[in-house]
Amino acid sequence: MGLSKKEKAMHHGQDEENIAHGEPAARKASLLFFSHTFFFFGAGGCRSATMSAATTLSESLVKLSTIPGRGRALVASRHIRPGEIILSDSPLLLYPAAFTPSPPTSFFCSYCFRSLLSVRLPCPTCSFAVFCSQYCLSAALTSSHSPSLCRSLDVLPRIRDTDLRALAVFLLAASNLSSTSPADFHRLLSLDGGDSSTAQAEAVVLHSLVAPLTGFSVDVTNALLAKDKRNAFGLMEPFRVEDAGERKVRAYGIYPNASLFNHDCLPNACRFDYLDREGNGNTDIMVRAIHDIPEGREVCLSYFPVKWGYKERQQRLTEDYGFRCSCDRCEVEKNWKDDAEESMEEEEEDEGVEAMEEEGGEVGGEENNDFPHAYFFVRYVCDQENCGGTMAPLPPQEKPSELMECNVCGRLRKQVDFVGEEGDVGNDIILDA
Ligand SMILES: C[S@@+](CC[C@H](N)C(=O)[O-])C[C@H]1O[C@@H](n2cnc3c(N)ncnc32)[C@H](O)[C@@H]1O
């Protein structure tokens, strides 16, 4: 759930979505989202996280099911209201998207991955990690940045390619997890990895570099890389308009429960993370309902930004996730001509408004045959410049919230009925940028 490491940035993205991979973000922004360029220097921590208030699957609003052709899936265990928190999850492990052995250039804590401000506590025994607090330093030394990981980072051969280097660090983190938390390591191995019986070229190269440090066989190395590709969520750097959609991934995380969400090109849920928010537990991700989800309906994320065109979506899903998508949206868009797809982004809002006006503004009303999902873009895709994140209401209190939050730029928008002039996207009020 990430962008393919090469351009990943990942919706298993929020920039979507990923799962997030934004929508979660495959290098990635696997379940992530957007194409990213690796830019920030990572610090040497790869943590197995235990610091938060995640929900277990049985406490969540979904239950595990198996759907032919889709594998495991999460379905609503009761009616879910817009904005409800369906699941919050802590990572089995996290690792930096870019790794450079030089703490003075690191911009985030090697344990909680929060931006480093004034406090910078270096690891006492290696030159790779730096922490934001004594709490993170102490926690890391007994988990994600154990003395043995410290030593491995020290002798890791120099790997020029940023994506390969990140994957080497992932393998070291997985090896560390196998010693510090064998149960979590087994959960990692239980995630979907497709048919990874034949080692890919990338796995063979990485295996030769890290096997002396991890002790993994080539098969285990291969299986772990496949699981990372299908399940990692990209935790992104803060959104900036001037990055023009090239939002960078700060870290990748593997979330055991959130990894069970399947993909839909028109998701009914999206994930949020708050890496730089004050307090512990920032590396948890939260999945919230975009709109009403009836009991028994499968809950899906988009593994990349919802605005992607048909060809790009199918290519990513085939190459990184091993399936062709035949969701309702794809069934419509597969008949579009290429130029129609290219102009979709420009036209979607106008068409969406027209479609909604024709249907009295009702989401889910009778369909416009050319673009039946236009309402989704009008209502749930952020229109802030260079953003395109997915919007979900804030969690309902006694009654549903009128505030929609973007899972990429964080903007809050008050949702008002779409009753404007033709071509007017509505009367949303921007509350926060
Ligand atoms: C993050 S996992 C999701 C959980 C997975 N189904 C399982 O059994 O663990 C991603 C994988 O699920 C499957 N998948 C996800 N969405 C799908 C869809 N819409 N149709 C078919 N398979 C899907 C693909 O095999 C994909 O690589």
Image: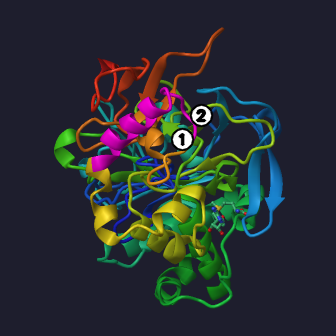
In the rendered image, is residue 310 in sight? yes
The alpha-carbon separation of the residues under discs 1 and 2 comes to 6 Å
Quick one: label 2, few (<14), some, or many (20+) residues within 10 Å? many
Q: Quadrant of the C terminus?
A: top left
Q: Position of residue 415 (x, y in %)?
A: 43, 20
Colour mapping used in the image: rainbow
Q: Position of residue 331 (x, y in %)?
A: 55, 64
Residue 355 falls inside the magenta stretch: yes
Check disc 1 and give the amino acid type. Arg
**Most extreme residue toward the front, as rendered?**
358
Residue 292 falls inside the magenta stretch: no
**Most extreme residue toward the top, as rendered?**
398
431 up-or-down from 383: above or below: above
In the rendered image, is residue 217 in sight? no
Most common secondary structure along the magenta stretch: helix
Residue identifier under label 1: 271
Residue identifier under label 2: 288
Q: Residue, x 36% and y 55% (percent of image)?
A: 34
Q: Which mark is residue 243?
A: none
